[in-house]
Amino acid sequence: MIVLVIAGLIGITLAAYLTWIGNHNKLAVRSQSWNAALPLMEAGIEEALAHLNSSPATWATNGFALANNVYAKRRDVTEGYYLLEISTNISTPTITCWSYHNSPLKAGYIKRGVRVTCLRTYSSGGLLVKNQIIMSGGSRIDSFGSCDPAQSGPGGVYDISKSSDHVTVASTAGTADAIHVGTAEIYGKVAVGPGGTATVAGGSVGDMAWHANGNTGFQPGSSSSDSSISISNVDPPSLGGAFSLPPGGTVNGTNYVRIFTGGTYLIGAIQFSAPGLVTAPTTIYCSGAFKISGSGFIRIAPGASLKVYVAAGEISVSGGGVVNDTLVAANCSFFGMPTCDKVTVSGSGAYIGSITAPSASATLSGSAGYFGSLTTSNATLSGGAAFHYDTCLGGNAKQPYSPNSWTEL
């Protein structure tokens, strides 16, 4: 009896142990299959993103078919299959992927799902605003490449005979008349936010051939309402070891009221009504308004560059403006902080550079033209002011769709 009882206990213990081992093995195998379903799901997301960015005329291609208001596709693989669905919202499309991985324990599949929202943004080049752009007076808006001899004249200067149609005039606003083209001539495209509109009255928007043929209005495909611009506030520069205002002097027969010889300068509000000179890479942090007026101007000498950060008030470039002897827009940059609310460019000289002031309303009326990029809250081009986007600054092309959020289902 004792032997039988001991044998029974040993049998029960062994059976329990074998059951535990079996359950543990099942859990381990199921965990491996659950994890294996993730790369299958990711493969589906990658295929959907590649499809969105392949620029088809319609998303009902490459095996995707429109059904129940989504573009759907199934792809079978060795490990199982996945189902893809893409929403019809071109501004912020949503990708839903269900992966079905073969179950090693029984017939069927282990299922996992994810939903990814996507955005397509614009970079900071070109003519970009948060709200409204108003053009009047027959302004010409086009592009050129100062670093490309095929798209510019000697030294990288703008040459109308080599100009191109690579500019995008964009607004994030989803309101009526977010871009008012008026009688302007835009050699490129316009884009507004979802629900917004662009209007034209006597002007023209399209590529070089569209304008060469004397067409007016919007060329088919030149206007879109999927602008998802990301315009961030400007951060201040590092002010370690900053200098105060430098003295002036005479250089090559010209008396300059200030000569910036490189480094970082911390100053208050300033107005240049007399010439200033920049002879080396220079950064200026201005706690108040920064103005150039009257007979004043700032000259950027060859080999030098200028970055101006304005904390409050306005940026006003009038009078002689900024004389950029480098002829490179990247060597002249103005930045407006969140409390910089106004930008004016009306000087008699050409402005070659970029201005980024996301909270400011900008007015361009300089007769000599603007060569570079502009990013503000609002913009008005008046008096036939010309705007020429320098593609060598980079950006402004419509960027690929990229994931914005990821939610497991």
Image: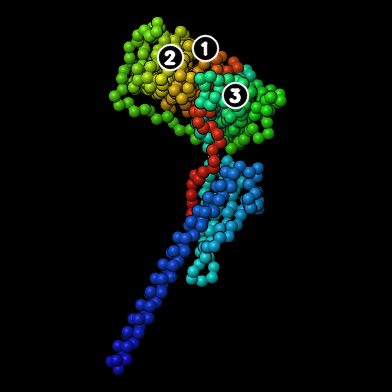
Q: Is residue 164 above or below residue 97?
A: above
Q: State left or right for residue 356 relative to residue 386.
A: left
Q: Would you call the spot at circle 1 few (<14 residues within 10 Å), some (14-19), or many (20 or more)?
A: some
Give whichever of 71, 51 is nearer the camera: 51
Give whichever of 142, 89 is nearer the camera: 142
* Residue 132 found in image quarter: top right
Q: Which residue is mark 1?
A: 348
* Residue 158 found in image quarter: top right
Q: Which badge, 1 or 3, comes first in the chain's sequence?
A: 3
Distance in Å between CA atoms under marks 2 and 3: 26 Å
Q: Is residue 58 above or below residue 301?
A: below
Residues under numbered marks 1 and 3 in contact, where contact means CB atoms less than 8 Å apart: no
Quarter of the image where the N terminus is located: bottom left
Q: State left or right for residue 270 relative to residue 104.
A: left
Q: Which residue is mark 3?
A: 163
Q: Which residue is mark 2?
A: 299
